[in-house]
Image (spheres, rainbow, N blue to C red):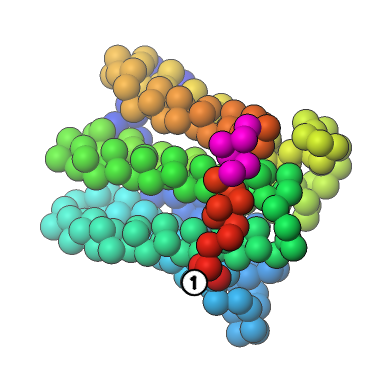
């Protein structure tokens, strides 16, 4: 990174561009099986989650734009609206996870894997959002955490893009129980970006807090995907969650 490039300035002046680019990849990943068929029948849980995840991403973009144009009062009002939007998004995710694993007639490796992939990502997202809200009065720390809420969301996007457009990559994914772990590529991309941001932050502001904390959270999540399925506590928890009468 050029030494003259200031991360604080980049977050406030360019974060909207980064978030819009992220949303473009969401559209690319989910166009064929969600956005292009909105008028068709789909399960309540898919639509419930899709609506609120889209709303959340648009809210992030709007917040970045409002900061860029110095509409701080509106930014604060929209931020308070997230106290309602985010919990609903979290609930919609939990319901979608449950509906997804219940497609299998029994609890198996796929259940443990899906729970680690989706539930743990949701927990990490919740923690990062919570840290962003906790530091809401420290604008630079707040901005860092809020931009980092996109990183636990990488794999639903990268998985679909890989399978649809660059399927030869699948054979290079590491395997668990003989199945390719395509989320590995999304994990790798997220980790590289966060490490880059941490280095940039250290070089320009001598900060080593936010991005290293987010990196640690992401690594815990990523490791969980490759290990939790082996542990009885996770198998028991997944079986308990599977049996709940949620969907």
Q: Residue at x 26, y 33 (%)?
A: 141
Could you say which quadrant of the image residue 229 lies in?
A: top right
Instruction: Please name whichever residue, 200 or 92, is drawn nearer the observer in this view of the structure.
Output: 92
| Residue 118 visible in image | no
Q: Answer above or below: position of 188 versus 151.
A: above
Above or below 2: residue 184? below
Where 52 falls versus 143 (above or below)? below
On-image quarter of the C terminus: bottom right
Q: Which residue was labeled with disc 1? A: 48
Mark 1 surroundings: few (<14), some (14-19) or many (≥20) residues within 10 A: some
The residue located at (51%, 29%) in the rendering is 220
The front one of 55 and 19 is: 55
Give coordinates of residue 4: x percent, y percent: 35, 20
Which of the pair 6/198 is nearer the observer?
198
Q: Which residues are magenta?
A: 231-236
Q: Position of residue 207 (x, y in %)?
A: 30, 18
- In the picture, residue 171 is in which quadrant? top right
Q: What SS does tag 1 mark?
A: helix
Q: How many marks can you see?
A: 1
235 magenta-colored:
yes
- Specify the principal SS of the magenta part: helix
Residue at figure coordinates x 28%, y 63% from the top left: 84
Expressed as whole percent of the image width and height from the top left, the position of residue 167 reads: 83, 47
Q: Is residue 174 visible?
A: yes
In the picture, measured across the screen, residue 72 lies left or right of residue 36, that is left
Q: Judge left or right: residue 209 versus residue 158.
A: left
Is 116 within the magenta? no
Residue ID at (21%, 40%): 134
Give residue 88's position: percent from left, percent from top.
Answer: 37, 64
């Amino acid at each position: 990174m050029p030494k003259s490039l200031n991360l604080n300035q980049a977050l406030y002046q360019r974060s909207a561009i980064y978030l819009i680019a992220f949303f473009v990849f969401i559209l690319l990943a989910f166009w064929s099986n969600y956005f292009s068929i909105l008028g068709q029948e789909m399960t309540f849980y898919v639509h419930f989650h899709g609506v609120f995840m889209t709303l959340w991403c648009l809210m992030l973009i709007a917040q970045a734009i409002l900061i860029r144009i110095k509409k701080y009062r509106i930014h604060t009002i929209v931020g308070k609206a997230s106290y309602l939007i985010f919990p609903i998004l979290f609930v919609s995710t939990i319901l979608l996870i449950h509906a997804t694993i219940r497609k299998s007639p029994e609890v198996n490796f796929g259940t443990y894997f899906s729970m680690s992939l989706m539930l743990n990502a949701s927990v990490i997202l919740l923690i990062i959002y919570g840290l962003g809200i906790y530091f809401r009065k420290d604008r630079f720390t707040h901005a860092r955490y809020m931009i980092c809420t996109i990183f636990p969301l990488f794999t639903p996007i990268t998985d679909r893009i890989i399978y649809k457009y660059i399927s030869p990559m699948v054979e290079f994914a590491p395997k668990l129980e003989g199945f390719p772990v395509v989320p590995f590529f999304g994990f790798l991309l997220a980790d590289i970006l966060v490490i880059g941001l941490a280095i940039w932050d250290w070089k320009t502001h001598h900060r080593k807090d936010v991005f290293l904390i987010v990196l640690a959270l992401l690594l815990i999540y990523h490791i969980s995907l490759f290990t939790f399925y082996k542990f009885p506590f996770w198998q028991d928890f997944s079986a308990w969650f599977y049996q709940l009468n949620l969907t």
